[in-house]
Structure formats: structure tokens, C-alpha cells
Image: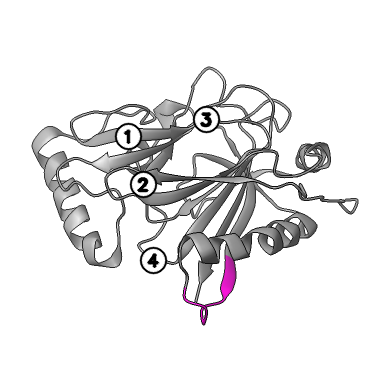
Amino acid sequence: MQNLDIGINPALRQEVVFLGQECTPLIIIDDFVTDITPLRQHAQQSDFQPDEKAYYPGLKAPLPKQYVAATLTALYPLVYQVYQIPKHLRLKPQNLFMALINQTENTLKPLQCMPHFDTSDGHYFAFLHYLNPQQHGNTGFFRHIPTGYERISDDRRENYFNCAQQFIDDHGSPKQQYFVKSDAHFELYYQVPYKANRLIIYPGNLLHSTIVDTTTDIDSSAVSGRLTANLFTSFI
């Protein structure tokens, strides 16, 4: 596959939104790369496969190394600044892939029918880059109503799981469908619209989910599906 010429927008501007009651910073950057076409073309030539070890409801393919290097080089100083990462900690990429949602709702497992968090590590971050021009589902952030938690930190993890299980015991398992709106268990309090060449950064311990539009998002095609670049990094 050809080498990619990834150009980061030299006039990069970021917006920092403070989410929810806990005021967690979320970084939003529009027009992240100067030309997104090469990245889309790379995706269209890639071999997307299911990841049997993960709960992602779709297909994944490796990200090109040039894109990963350019993205993290451009953005790691911003993450240090916004999230006040201690200077002695160093960035370590953890999971890097392009993704497409393709699971129909009748194939979802119970944990895929609820908002989730990636890890309780407070220094783990998701970089999510929307790549396709069509309208697709947003990224939603949720509050766990029984506890009030928006972030599941190490010291909250056990209580969160216990309270979530108690809610399920009392009210039944979640419906076999994508979680796209508030109910008695989780409140959807913020959404970032899917927009081509928009990149967002947020802590992986925030409760979140794709607001899947089943009419547009369940699509294995890199041309028309909900194509994203996903970079997960920690600071250790």
C-alpha cells in the first residue's frame, strides 16, 4: 500500500468543552488534516476484520503508521496541557485502528447495549477522527443515574459495577438494541456530531457510546459507512 502524505492543518484550532456536572475537558478539532482523501482511500483499500477479543460492534483495520505519527506528534502537547498530565509521564500508544460498525441489533451482546468506558485509568485517552462525508451517528456521553458518575475512575469502578448490576437485577437486562437516548439507568447529557475531518479527544474513563443510526451506520463499506480513525493512548 502506498505511503501516505499526511498533512496536519497548520492553522489548527481547538475548542475545549467541559462536559457534564464533573466538567471533564473534551477537545474538538475541526479540519484536522489538510486533505482527508488519502486517508479515506487507504481505508477503502484496507482489509477490515472483526475483532473477536473486543466488544466493538464492527470491523477494524490497521491505521497507517504515517498518520499515527503525524497525529500524535501534533496533539500530544495539547493533551499534556489540557489534562494537566504530569511531565514525567510519557505517551504510549495502546490501540490504533480504523473502524466500521456493522453489527445488527439482533446480534448484540448485553454489554454492547449499554454505554461503556474504555478503562478506569485516569491517564488513558481516546482520539477519535471522523472520516466520511455522509451523515452518521454522533458520539454520546452519559451519566450513570444511580451513582451520578460520568467518569469511572479506579476508586469508583467497584461501586459502579455493583450499582449497575443491582439496577439490572431490579429492572431486567437492557433491550437488545443500541443505546441512543436517556432512560432510567443512564442519562445522555452531551453529543458530538459526526462531521468529516473532525477529531475529538476525551478521557477513556468517560461513559460514552456511539449514537448509532441503524439506517446509515450499520455498513461494512469504507466508502459509505461510519468510518473512524481510533487512537487510544496512555501516559505512563
Q: Residue at x 54, y 61 (%)?
A: 79
Image label count:
4
Name the residue tied to disc 2.
116
> Which numbered disc flags the more N-terminal residue, 1 or 2?
2
Q: Nearer the viewer, residue 76 or 51?
A: 76
Q: Marks 1 and 2, how far apart in space? A: 15 Å
State which region is magenta.
86-93
Residue 115 placement (x, y as % from top left): 34, 41
Residue 111 placement (x, y as % from top left): 34, 43
Mark 1 or mark 2, which is nearer to you? 1
Q: Amino acid at mark 2?
A: His
Q: Amino acid at mark 3?
A: Pro
Q: Residue at x 47, y 70 (%)?
A: 85
Mark 4 or mark 2, which is nearer to you? 4
Q: Is residue 92 magenta?
A: yes
Tell me if I can see residue 96 in this picture: yes
> Which numbered disc flags the more N-terminal residue, 4 or 3?
4
Q: Marks 1 and 4, how far apart in space? A: 22 Å
In this view, the residue farthest toward the right is: 2
Residue count near mark 2 (Cα–Cα under 10 Å), binned few <14, some 14–19, many ≥20: some
Q: Marks 3 and 1, how far apart in space? A: 13 Å
Q: Amino acid at mark 4?
A: Asp
Give SS at disc 4: loop
Pointer 3 with pointer 1, Cβ within 8 A: no
- Residue 48, label in figure: none
Name the residue tied to disc 1.
189
